[in-house]
Amino acid sequence: MPEFLPATPELTEEQQARVSTVLGDLCGVPALGDRYGAIDAVESLSDLATVPVLLKDDLQVALGHLQPRARHGATWVFQSGGSTGSPQVGYAPTGLYMADVFKHWPALDRDDVFVNGWNAGKMWGAHFLVNCFVDHAGCVAMNLGGISRDEYDPWLRFFADRKVTAYGGTTSVLRLVFSHARDAGIKLPDLRKVLWLGEAWDPQLDEDIPIVAPRAARWGMFGSTETWVIGTNTPDCPANVWHPLPSQLVCVGDDEMLDFTSLNPQVLNPILRYRTGDAGRAVTCPCGRPGPAFQVLGRRDHLIKFRGCLLDVDDFVAAVSARPRVAQAQLVVRERHEGDVLEVRLLATGQGDSQLAAQVREHIVGSAFGPSDMFLEHPESLEVLVVESLIGNERTGKVPHLVVRSER
Ligand SMILES: [Zn+2]
């Protein structure tokens, strides 16, 4: 039986009304009407636990039908996931719900000088979301975006000169920047806060940050483009433990799969027992903050995070396998200190030739969604090989779509 986190308060009347509105919306989606039409009123958490989980594809079907619009301001559309296939979208009103986050997460204050290191563009939400958070904090802010290796030195010097107190980005970006700063002997004595969002914390940062910026501590946000921010943590919490916002209900279902329900009436996406693919469990956070907390155990579906980009392994393999003269494809993620590499292994139909790998690579990099942007910026992160055989399980003969190899 699915269970909400301990210490989750019972549904208020307003929250029951919100659930009822979302259920009504989902009932109106032709492909989902049968599933949601049979549900009686949801008046308690135990009623809510009987509502079926909403999967990623279901949500996209629902959004395609509902086409939500914000009551005030603009309706923003962001995308996540998708690789060579179509992207998954999420809608949000101006402000991206950051007033709620700011109320519960004091990561920045008026005295901070903050550098936003998340890439902007390609409909990715992180950069804009953090800027909305900054609006509430009222600090000084600079939009840097991601930087490449040859830009590290001048920008790190700029951080030191401008007495930057806070810097944020995906952990892939932070890891490269801080390890470079450490190797180059660059110090950031004013840096006190490292904000992170978008992928799991990298333990290497715990080694590098204290040497580069002895006063800096990590402040994390957890969520997705569909759910927006679900929870936050502070330097006193373990990196994979999160405190949900009061408007976000977290439920632990079968196989420790987490699902999320957004009770904020402003929320445009119908997030009702929505399963993102993350597994987790209820925990007590050693920081001592009251209320529910959960630990994230990682993803258990075909979506992986590769250098901060969500990549749908099955979609990717299917799209590459459908290319002319490709018999079968497989992805190998090689985890390396210098940054992970995605190796695309191909079995050719008939005689493979030297052109095939180059053509497939061009197709992957030229597609508009998912990590293609990152492959353009970091060409060394993608390798396409024509091979004699794929990596399989000798006992079962199964060839997985994805193999992960640590070279650290
Ligand atoms: Zn905590």
Image (spheres, helix red, strand yellow):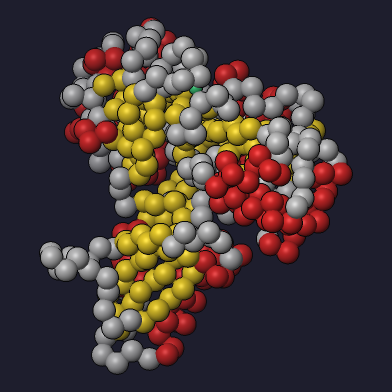
Residue name at image x 51 percent, y 26 percent: 237
- Where does the image place residue 50, in percent across and percent down from the top left? 21, 22
Q: Residue visible at 55% across and 33% down? A: 220
Q: Residue at x 46, y 73 (%)?
A: 383
Q: From this view, report whether residue 251 is shown above or below residue 356.
A: above
| Vertical arrangement, residue 86 with respect to residue 40, above or below | below
Residue 310 visible here:
yes
Which of the 4 image quadrants contains residue 253? Answer: top left
Location of the N terminus by quadrant is top left
Q: Is residue 125 left or right of residue 49?
A: right
**Left or right relative to 305: residue 192:** right
Q: How many marks?
A: 0
x, y percentage for residue 86? 41, 57
- Most distant residue in the right direction: 161
- Residue 86 can be seen, yes or no: no
Q: Position of residue 327 (x, y in %)?
A: 26, 79
Residue 145 as seen in the image, left or right of residue 403:
right
Instruction: Tell which residue pokes out farthest to the top in this image.
Output: 13
208 versus 229 height, above or below: below
Q: Is 399 placed left or right of 65 in the picture?
A: left
Q: Nearer the viewer, residue 235 or 329?
A: 235
Q: Residue at x 44, y 29 (%)?
A: 241
Instruction: Give the image quarter of residue 83.
Output: bottom left
Q: Is residue 290 above or below residue 148?
A: above
Which of the pair 254/69 is nearer the observer? 254
Horizontal and vertical percent position of residue 38: 18, 25
